[in-house]
Amino acid sequence: MHSSPKSVEPSHAEPADPPYDVVIAGCGPTGAMLAAELRLHGVRVLVAERESEPGPMVRIVGLHIRSLELMAMRGLLDRLLPHGRRRPAAGFFAAIPKPAPEGLDTPYAYVLGMPQPVINRLLEERAAELGAQVIPGRAVTGFEQDAEGVTVELTGGERLRARYLIGCDGARSTVRKRLGVGFPGEPARNDTLMGEMEASAPQEEIAAVASAVAARQWPFWIRPFNGGRTYSVVVPAGGVADRSRPPTLDDFRQRLRAVAGTDFGVHSPRWLSRFGDATRLAERYRVGRVLLAGDAAHIHPPFGGQGLNLGIQDAVNLGWKLAAQVRGWAPDTLLDTYHAERHPVAADVLDNTRAQAVLASPEAGPRAVRRLLAELMDIDEVNRRLIEKITAIAVRYDFGAGPDLLGRRMPDVGLTRCRLYDLLRGGRGLLLDRTGRLTAGGWSDRVDQLTDPGAAVDVPGVLLRPDGHVAWLGDDQRDLDEHLARWFGEPAG
């Protein structure tokens, strides 16, 4: 689904008054989520999407716990659930089959698997409902920025003026390249074939062979879904890793025979693809009025299924901060906290995918380490730590010295009349007060307040940012005011 581009008129003159506050390059999950977040605050948003129509690839991806929390926080989870399939939050790290830890600190202790085009469509629909304009078939091809804004050039030479430009245009980001931001890391060394197709071999035979192969070769799987009629297939590309052409069904048959001794009679592919293990991280997420998010800022192998989730979480971190900047109430350093907070998170994801890539090696040393790690994961604390890392509920931003909860995301705890996340749907801050003595005062135009002595939290008061991270805890009004000013600027009046 794309909205009509009719209101965007070609112009080679530079408008004096920017018609848009923000132009977003790319309408994948990151760009669409960011557009929706900005529209919660009335920011005028244009999203330029390179593709005219959704692509043919129907890859199944998973929303992890923290992304599910963010969807619940914005009232989107009920929209997504009918289109997905819930699976236990288990077996993510290097595909080592361990059960989900008990008592994870969330009501959303599962992964929601669904086709990526469906996620794209639902998030784009949400952005459009809120008033974002999405134009298909027009990529951002260049830009120039100055002290007042950014002049953005689209396909065909159209020029638009905006206050900010956000590159959500993928791993080969034009915005990042034109911005001159370094993208250091490691190039792809190994390729993997991935696809969905039917298979004529008996399901019991497929399961037995796949289990035996997976015990000695990773990444490898052939897993049924869609009622067992279709299989998800992952197999090392080996000698057919020619990136100059898309993979074919014959490539899959060849590699399956080489690795598993049979091609399982695969046929009728729905989509075929390959991915490499390139790992790169942008040196900076912001240069002046141009910022990067999602795959434009970081790429890594899909081990643990973290990439889409990382981009969505970038969008929610950035959205309210950029809106505050546009609206004129942001503290001087607020927008800089986007890089300061999200760059280390991406670096940690890159490190854990590097570790998982090593564990994918068929060589004796990495296989021994994999067996040892599998043994250690029988210890609940180890398994729990890895699951919390992969699903991003262990993220703690550095807000300075304070209790352990400071800088962490607040779980969706129960309140007397509702759940906590129900109060965050508008993308505003929230002061939750159990004492009856605290107030948001002059920040009430940016921060909602609830006095609830029965709230299921063990602190007298807590200040939440719009992304659900804890900005302050305590019961001292003066201390609260200092933190309100730190995150939400000067009080009104």
Image: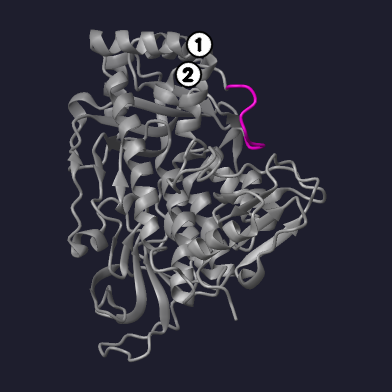
Q: Is residue 187 left or right of residue 298?
A: left
Kind of residue sitting beneath label 1: Asp
Q: Nearer the viewer, residue 445 or 354?
A: 445
Residue 151 x/y as whole percent: 28, 79
> Is 50 rendered above or below residue 99?
below
**Is the C terminus in the top left, top right, bottom left or bottom right quadrant?**
bottom right
Apparent side of residue 22 relative to residue 254 in the rendered image (left or right)? right
Q: Residue at x 69, y 57 (%)?
A: 423
Residue 375 in sight here: yes
Secondary structure of the residue carrying numbered label 2: helix
Identify the mark at residue 382; answer none if there is no mark: 2
Give the class, few, some or many, for how many residues have Cα within 10 Å of label 1's Cα (few <14, many ≥20).
few
Q: Quadrant of residue 192?
A: top left
Q: Please tell me whether residue 422 is drawn above or below residue 68 in the rendered image.
A: below
Which of 380/130 is in front?
380
Res. 1 in view: no
Residue visible at 21% across and 42% down in the picture:
245
Viewer-nearest of discs 2 and 1: 2
Q: Which amino acid lies under the numbered mark 2 shown in the image of this protein? A: Val
Identify the residue position indicated by label 1 in the image: 378
